Amino acid sequence: MQEFTQSGGVRPFGISLMIAGWDETEGPQLYQVDPSGAFFGWKASAIGKNYANAKSFLEKRYSEDIELEDAIHTAILTLKEGFEGAINEH
């Protein structure tokens, strides 16, 4: 992402990206990459139009010892908190 914007005559990408994964020794990992190419590690975070609502919601619900099922449920509720349209099962 950052390498492309080093060429003259191109506009920088105006996006942020969240990457989630699993490390066998460290467990769950979450990183955010911003348009400059800088990256940050998080325990929980949100990006996008309504990120402030989602982050506030996560701050109230997140804990270090959260169980997987609760984490999944919290993630879904966080998406609903930040989404302005209708969310359905399809």
Image (tube, helix red, strand yellow):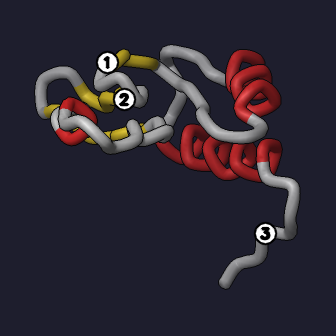
- Mark 2 vs 1: CB contact within 8 A: yes
Disc assigned to residue 33:
2
State the image coordinates of residue 16 (x, y, percent, origin top left).
46, 36
Kind of residue at disc 1: Ala
- The crowding category of the residue bearing disc 1, from other C-alpha atoms within 10 Å (few below 14, some 14 to 19, many at least 20), is few
Describe residue 55's horizontal placement relative to residue 38 as left or right: right
> Which residue was labeled with disc 3?
87
State the image coordinates of residue 74 (x, y, percent, origin top left).
66, 40
Image quadrant of residue 90? bottom right
Q: Residue at x 34, y 40 (%)?
A: 19
- Extreme-front residue of the structure: 9
Tell me the distance, in whole angstroms, between the alpha carbons under discs 1 and 3. 32 Å
> Which residue was labeled with disc 1?
38
Indicate which disc, 2 or 3, sits on the residue closer to the N terminus. 2
Kind of residue at disc 3: Ile
- Extreme-left residue of the structure: 25
Q: Secondary structure at mark 1?
A: loop
Q: Is residue 37 above or below residue 14?
A: above
Q: Is residue 71 above or below residue 52?
A: below
State which mark lies toward you, 1 or 3.
1
Q: Secondary structure at mark 2?
A: strand
Does the image show residue 77?
yes
Tell me the distance, in whole angstroms, between the alpha carbons under discs 2 and 1. 6 Å
Tell me the distance, in whole angstroms, between the alpha carbons under discs 2 and 3. 26 Å
